[in-house]
Image (tube, coloured by chain):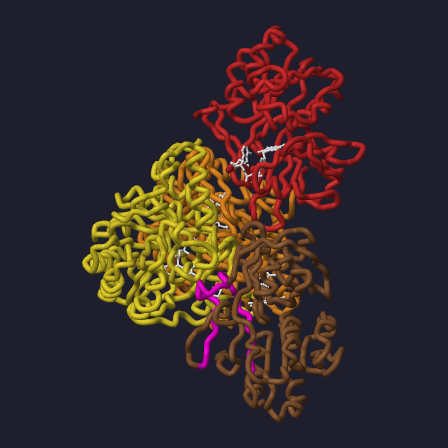
Chain colours: A orange, B yellow, C red, D brown
Amino acid sequence: MTDLSVRIGGLGLRNPVLTASGTFGYGTEYAGYFDAGLLGGIVTKTVTLEPREGNPMPRLAETPAGMLNSIGLANVGIERFLSEKLPALEGLDTRVVVNVAGNTAEEYAEVTSRAAGHPRVDAIEVNVSCPNVRHGGLAFGTNPSATAEVTAAVRAATSKPVIVKLTPNVTDIAEIARAAEAAGADALSLINTVLGMAIDIGTRRPLIARRTAGLSGPAIKPIAIAKVYQVRQAVKLPLIGIGGIMRWQDAVEFLLAGATAVQTGTLHFLEPDGPVRIVEGLRRYCEERGIASVSELVGGMIEESS
Amino acid sequence: MTDLSVRIGGLGLRNPVLTASGTFGYGTEYAGYFDAGLLGGIVTKTVTLEPREGNPMPRLAETPAGMLNSIGLANVGIERFLSEKLPALEGLDTRVVVNVAGNTAEEYAEVTSRAAGHPRVDAIEVNVSCPNVRHGGLAFGTNPSATAEVTAAVRAATSKPVIVKLTPNVTDIAEIARAAEAAGADALSLINTVLGMAIDIGTRRPLIARRTAGLSGPAIKPIAIAKVYQVRQAVKLPLIGIGGIMRWQDAVEFLLAGATAVQTGTLHFLEPDGPVRIVEGLRRYCEERGIASVSELVGGMIEESS
Amino acid sequence: MTASMTCKVAAHGQAGPGIFILELKAAALVSAAGPGQFVHLKTADGIDPLWRRPFSIHRVNRRRGTILLSYRRIGRGTSLLARRTAGDTIDLLGPLGRPFDLEGGFTTAVIAAGGLGAAPVPFLLDALRRKGRKAVVLWGVRSKTELYCLDALRGRYTSIHIATEDGTEGFRGRVTDLFGRLASEFASGSGFRGFACGPMPMLKALQPLAAASGFPWQASLEERMACGVGVCQGCVVRMKNRQYRTVCADGPVFDLAELDFHD
Amino acid sequence: MTASMTCKVAAHGQAGPGIFILELKAAALVSAAGPGQFVHLKTADGIDPLWRRPFSIHRVNRRRGTILLSYRRIGRGTSLLARRTAGDTIDLLGPLGRPFDLEGGFTTAVIAAGGLGAAPVPFLLDALRRKGRKAVVLWGVRSKTELYCLDALRGRYTSIHIATEDGTEGFRGRVTDLFGRLASEFASGSGFRGFACGPMPMLKALQPLAAASGFPWQASLEERMACGVGVCQGCVVRMKNRQYRTVCADGPVFDLAELDFHD
Ligand SMILES: Cc1cc2nc3c(=O)[nH]c(=O)nc-3n(C[C@H](O)[C@H](O)[C@H](O)COP(=O)(O)OP(=O)(O)OC[C@H]3O[C@@H](n4cnc5c(N)ncnc54)[C@H](O)[C@@H]3O)c2cc1C
Ligand SMILES: Cc1cc2nc3c(=O)[nH]c(=O)nc-3n(C[C@H](O)[C@H](O)[C@H](O)COP(=O)(O)OP(=O)(O)OC[C@H]3O[C@@H](n4cnc5c(N)ncnc54)[C@H](O)[C@@H]3O)c2cc1C
Ligand SMILES: Cc1cc2nc3c(=O)[nH]c(=O)nc-3n(C[C@H](O)[C@H](O)[C@H](O)COP(=O)(O)O)c2cc1C
Ligand SMILES: Cc1cc2nc3c(=O)[nH]c(=O)nc-3n(C[C@H](O)[C@H](O)[C@H](O)COP(=O)(O)O)c2cc1C
Ligand code: FES
Ligand code: FES
C-alpha cells in the first residue's frame, strides 16, 4: 500500500491532487460526478471583498490543445461566500483552500482574515497572477516587491498556511518566488494562465471581449514544468504544480520536476471526474513500482538525460 | 487580382510568407518539395562567427500541439555559410534574410557586416531570443538595454534592413520592442520559442539534454498573437508574426493582430510545402472577399468583440 | 441528477446536406431529460479539439431507451462526430441545463425556430402533446435544403409554417418576418406561450415582436461552452438587470424579455 | 528525389501481437528506395500527435507497386495508424535517409537485428539476393511472440538464427550473446560485411564485438525525429570525432565503428 499523503506548508493532504481555482466552482458543482473526499483538496474560485460580475462576454475561446478564459474573477464576494458557499462544504472530507484576491494588499488581507477565520478553511491561496483583471492580479505578481507586499499582508492576517500562486508571464519567475518566500509564504503554486489572444477571422473581432486572456490546458504544460523546475532551484518551499494536467502521467511529471502536489483545472471541463482518475493512476503507478510514498517522487528527476 | 506584396522596413516582399529561422535549413534542403520562389522570403538558420556543433542530444521532444527544441544554434559558421551555403541560393527568386547571433554585440556586428556584404543577402534578422544557448540569445533579448546595444551594433554594421527577433519570455515585451526601435531596427519579428521543459516519466530524465528548451507549434499561437498585438501598440515598426502558424487562417489572424508578414516554422516538419499552401490560401481568401491588397488586413482587427 | 456516461451509438444517419441525426443508447436520460436540455459530448478521443461540444436533445425514444441529437457538421468537432457509426461509443454529460417551462396555464405554444435552432423542437412538441397543448411552429431557414425532420414536427395538435430566406419553400423571408405576418392569429394574447430557439441575431430581432405579442416568451440560447455545468462561468449572457447568467446552468432557456442583447 | 505524397492503403493486417504490416501503393518509391531508407508518415489528420512518424521500409513489392512497412503499436501515433484500413489514404515523405551500402567486395552479409529493428531486414535481404550475396541473420527478441515475417527472412542464400531473452525460441539470450557464440563462423573476417539494426543499447553492446569481428559493420539508428529531412538538426547522434550527425539525413545508416555511444 502506497502512502499517497503529502504535506504542503504544514497542511497534510490525503493525496497530492487538488482542483485548481476557477475550475471547480465553490466545490459543490461537481458533487453529482464524484466525491470530492477522494481528492487531496479543493481550491475555490477566487474570492474578493465585494461581489464581482466579471468581464464582458465572450469570455471563452478554444485554442490548439488549450483554451483562453477571461472570466475576470467573477465571484459572489466574501460575504456571500461565507454565508452561502462555505456551509455547503461542511460535509466534505477534504482540504478546503480559499483563493483570494483584491485591489490592494489591504483587501487581500481583509478577505484572508475573514475567510481564514472560518474553521472549514484549511489554507489560503493568494492569487497575484490573474491576467484578466486591471487591478490586483498580474500587476502584483509580475513585480517582486508587490508580490512580497501582498504576501506579507496575507501572512499577517492568518496563521493558516499561505500559498502564493505565481504567474508565468515574467522574465524571471525565480525572483518572484524568492520574494514570496522571504515575505512568509508557506508554499507556492504555479502556474496561473499564460497571457494569450485569439481573433475570429470571420468577424475580424477578438474572440474574447477583453482581447487578451489566460491560456490553460495541455498546450501550456511544458511551460509549467519549466517554471516548476526553475522555482524548485530558487526556493525551499513546497510547490504545487499546475498547468495542462490531463493524465496521471502529467502529475508524475510535475512531481519529478519538483512539485509536492498538483492542481488540475481545464481537465474538469473535459472529464469532471478527471482528478479522481489521476489519484487512482498515481496509486497504481506507485504500487506497481513498489514506491512506498508518493513523496519519493518529488524532485526525483535525474538531471542527466538518457 | 489581389496584390499580395508587402514592405518590411524598406524590403519589398512578393508575399507576406517567409520561413522561420532554424526550420528551413540554409534554404535548399526543401528544394525537392517546392520552389522557394513562391514565398515572400526565407530566413536562414542562425549563423554565428564560429561554427557550432550545437547542444548535446536528445534535442527534440513532442508536446501537446507543440514541440521542444534545443538545437542550440548548431551552424557552419559565417565563413562556410558564405562560401558553401549562400552560393546555392543564387538561383532562388526570393528574399534571403540571414539570421545572426553572437556572444557579444561585437560578434553580432561582425557576422552582420560579413553576411550583409554579400549581394545575395537582402536583410538581417537579429536573434536575441534563443532560449537554447548560455550566452547571447535570451540573455540579450530579455533586457532592454542589451537589446538596444546589440541592435545598435548591427545597425551600424549594415545599411540593409535590420529585423530584431523578440522573445516572449519577458514580463513586458513592449519595453524590449521600444528599445529595439529606438536603437535603429527597421522591423521586429516575434515570437521566438517559449521556454519549456518535459520529463520522461519512464526514465525520470529530462526529455531534452539541456533540460529546458524552446516550445514552438500550434500550442504557442495564442501567446504569439497576444505579443504581436501588444507590440503593435508600442511601436511603429512593421512586425513579422511567428508562432504556431499551420494554416492560412492563422496567417490572417497574425495580420489582423498587426503583423505585416509572417514566418512559418514547425509547420515545415509536418508539411514541407505548408508555406506555399498558406500563400495560396491567402490569395484565395483575399480574392473571394475582393480585398485588393493583402496589406489592408494588417492591424485590421476590429477592437470590439462581436 | 446529471452524470458522465459512455453511450453506444444506436443509429447515425444523414437527414440533409451536412445535417445528421445521432441516436444514442441512454436509458437513464430518457426519463431524466426535459425539452430544451442538452448533452455535452466528447467528439475527439484526444485533445483535438479540446472541449466537449453541446447539443440539444432533439427527441427521446422511450421505447428504444435512446436520445436523438440532430446537428450540422460545421467544424472539427462535428466532423469527428459525423464519423461515428452504430456500435461506437461516445462519452456524454447530461442532461444539462434547465428545460423549457411547460407548467401553468396556456393552451397553445407558439414556437419560433431559426435554422438548426430547431433541434430541440421535436422533443418540445412531444412534451406539449403529452400535456394536450396545441402548437404552432414557425421555422425559418436560409434555403429549403436546410429543412429536416419535418415529419417529427407535423402531427396532432401541431401546425407548421416555413420561411426560407431564398423563397425556395413557404414564406420568403425570415422567421421574424413570418411571425410578424401571422401575428394577428395570436392577437388575443391569452392562452399562448412563446418558445424561441435559434441564433442570437434572430432572438434579438424577435425580442421586440415578442414583447408586443402580449404573451410570455422563453428563449433557448447558444454560447461557446467549456464546462457545460456552470463551473467555469464562461458561457455567460447579460440580463437586463446587468447581471451575467451562465447559459449552461442558468439556461439555456431564459425569459426572452430579460435578455440584454447589447451590441 | 524525395517527395511528399498521398498514398492509398493497399492492405493492412496484424502479423503478431501489436505488430502490423502496412502495404502502401507508392509506385514511385519502389524503384527509388533502397534498403535502410525510411518514410515519414502523418498518423493524425490534425495535430494530435503533431509530428510525423518514421518507419523503415520493410519490403517493396515491385509487381504491385507497393511498399510495405512493419510496425509495433506503442503510442498514439501507431495506434492511429493501426486504425487505417485498405482504401484509406496516408500522407508520406520518402524515401528518406541513406540506405545500406551494398557496393564493394563481400560475399556474405551478417545481419544482427534487435526486436522491431528487424523491420528493414527483409528489404535488405531482397537486395542482397538480387546481388547474389549470401546472408546470415541473427535476430534477437524478448520472446517468441515478437517474431514475425519469418517467411520473408528465410529463403535462398539466407540462414537465420533466433535468440529470445526468455528462451521461448532458439538461443536463450540477447542477439549480441548469440553473435558471440557464432563468432567463430565469421572468424576468417574476409568476405563478410556486418549490418546491424536495433535499439541503441543493442548497438552499443554490439560495437566492441563488431570491432573484434575483423569485418566492417554498418548500423541503422533510430532517434526521435521532427522534420525527417535534415533541416531541424534535431535527431543528432555523436560521432567519435565529437561531431553531430543527423540520423534522418546523414543516416540512419552509419559506420558502426564511428558512433560515439556516450552514456
Ligand atoms: C446549448 C447548446 C445546444 C446546441 N445544440 C445544437 C444542436 O442541437 N445541433 C447543432 O448542430 N448544434 C448545436 N449547438 C451548436 C454546437 O454546439 C456547435 O455547432 C458545435 O459545438 C460546433 O463544433 P465544431 O467543432 O464542429 O465547430 P467549431 O470548429 O468549434 O466551429 C466552427 C465554426 O462554427 C462556429 N460555432 C461554434 N460553436 C458555435 C455555436 N454554439 N453557435 C454558433 N456558432 C458556433 C465557430 O465560431 C466557428 O466559426 C448547440 C450549442 C449549445 C451551446
Ligand atoms: C529511422 C526510423 C525508422 C523506424 N522504423 C520503424 C519500423 O520500421 N517499425 C517500427 O515499429 N518502428 C520504427 N521506428 C520507431 C517508430 O518511429 C516509433 O515507434 C513511432 O514513432 C512511435 O510513435 P507513437 O506515436 O506510436 O509512440 P509515441 O507516443 O511517440 O511513443 C510511445 C513510447 O515509445 C517511445 N518511442 C517513440 N519513438 C521511439 C523510437 N524511435 N525509438 C524508441 N522508442 C520510441 C516513446 O519515448 C514513448 O515512451 C523507426 C524510427 C526511426 C527513427
Ligand atoms: C475558466 C478558468 C477560470 C479560472 N479562474 C481562476 C481564478 O479565479 N483564480 C485563479 O487563481 N486561477 C484561475 N484559473 C487558473 C487555473 O486555476 C489554473 O492555474 C490554470 O487554468 C492552469 O491549469 P490548467 O492548465 O490545468 O487549467 C482559471 C482557469 C480557468 C480555465
Ligand atoms: C527546430 C527549431 C530550430 C530553431 N532554430 C532557430 C534559430 O536558429 N534561430 C532563431 O532565431 N529561431 C529558431 N527557431 C525558432 C523559430 O524560428 C520560430 O521563431 C519558432 O519556432 C516559432 O514558430 P513556429 O511555432 O511556427 O515554429 C527554431 C525553431 C525550431 C522548431
Ligand atoms: S460553460 Fe462553464 S459555466 Fe457554462
Ligand atoms: S529530424 Fe530534423 S534533422 Fe533529423
Which residue does the image show at 56% across and 11% down from the upper left? C180
* In this picture, residue A231 sits left or right of residue A44: left
Q: Quadrant of the C terminus of chain C?
A: top left
Decide whether residue B170 is among the magenta residues. Answer: no
Which residue does the image show at 58% across and 82% down from the upper left? D205
Q: Nearer the viewer, residue A55 or B202?
A: B202
First to last magenta residue range:
D217-240
> Is residue D208 in view from this perspective?
yes
Q: Quadrant of the N terminus of chain C?
A: top right
Which quadrant contains ligand 4?
bottom left
Label the magenta part by its dominant secondary structure.
Answer: loop
Q: Nearer the viewer, residue B110 or D155?
A: D155
Residue C9 pos. (x, y %)? 73, 41
Q: Residue furthest right?
A: C63
* In this picture, residue D84 sits left or right of residue A173: right
Q: Nearer the viewer, residue D170 or A126?
A: D170
Q: Nearer the viewer, residue A101 or D154?
A: D154
Residue D234 pos. (x, y %)? 46, 66
Residue C70 pos. (x, y %)? 66, 32
Q: Is residue C114 above or below residue D117?
A: above
* In this picture, residue A105 sits left or right of residue C174: left
Residue D163 pos. (x, y %)? 70, 80
* In this picture, residue B153 sits left or right of residue C93: left
